[in-house]
Image (cartoon, rainbow, N blue to C red):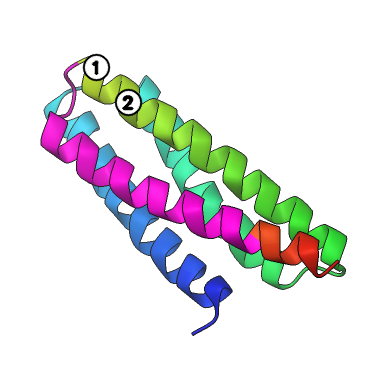
Amino acid sequence: MAKESILIEKSLHFAARIIKLNQYLTKQKSEYIISKQIVRSATSIGANANEAIYGVSKADFIAKLHIALKETAETEYWLRLLMMSGYITQVEGESLIADCLEIKRILVSTLNTAKENK
């Protein structure tokens, strides 16, 4: 399976986890601001990665993956903030951050390969 396929699959599953987190945050914790931000950034990772696959050029592919990488960094920030503020437990946060960092590693690896083959 190509790195791009793994990236799409992992980012899709991650986005689904974040959507479930959003449901928990809004229904159980009455938290609406950060939950809205994290849904936007986390779902954007996979959307941009998927769009990159259909880019019109190598430069377009790289640009879309850079956006996905930025969204990954933003999502990681929101997760850390949710943990620090007590909205999610350390265990929940670390599990989500581990998935986020795995996606980040795949993005960095894919970007490095794309830049080498440019």
Q: Is residue 106 magenta?
A: yes
The secondary structure that most of the magenta stretch takes on is helix
> Which residue in the structure is indicated by mark 1?
84
Q: Is residue 74 magenta?
A: no
Kind of residue at badge 1: Met
Give the answer, above or below, for where 118 lies relative to 78.
below
Q: Secondary structure at mark 1?
A: helix
Q: Secondary structure at mark 2?
A: helix
**Residue 23 visible to an observer of this rendering:** no
Q: Position of residue 45 (x, y in %)?
A: 53, 51
Q: Check the image and name the residue furthest to the front.
A: 116
Q: Residue at x 59, y 53 (%)?
A: 108
Q: Position of residue 2 (x, y in %)?
A: 55, 81
- The answer to whether marks 2 and 1 mark residues whose Cβ atoms lie closer than 8 Å is yes
Left or right of residue 60: residue 93: left
Give the answer, above or below, for where 103 lies relative to 79.
below
Q: Residue at x 49, y 53 (%)?
A: 105
Q: Which mark is residue 80?
A: 2
Kind of residue at badge 2: Arg
Residue span colored magenta: 86-110
Give the answer, above or below, for where 103 lies relative to 5.
above
Q: Looking at the picture, tell me which residue is in the foreground, 69 or 46.
A: 69
Q: Looking at the picture, tell me which residue is in the foreground, 93 or 111.
A: 111
Q: Which mark is residue 42?
A: none
**Crowdedness near tag 1: few (<14), some (14–19) or many (≥20) residues, C-alpha within 10 Å:** few
**Residue 93 visible to an observer of this rendering:** yes
How far is the residue under mark 2 from the one under mark 1?
6 Å
Q: Check the image and name the residue furthest to the bottom.
A: 1
Say which quarter of the image contains residue 102: bottom left
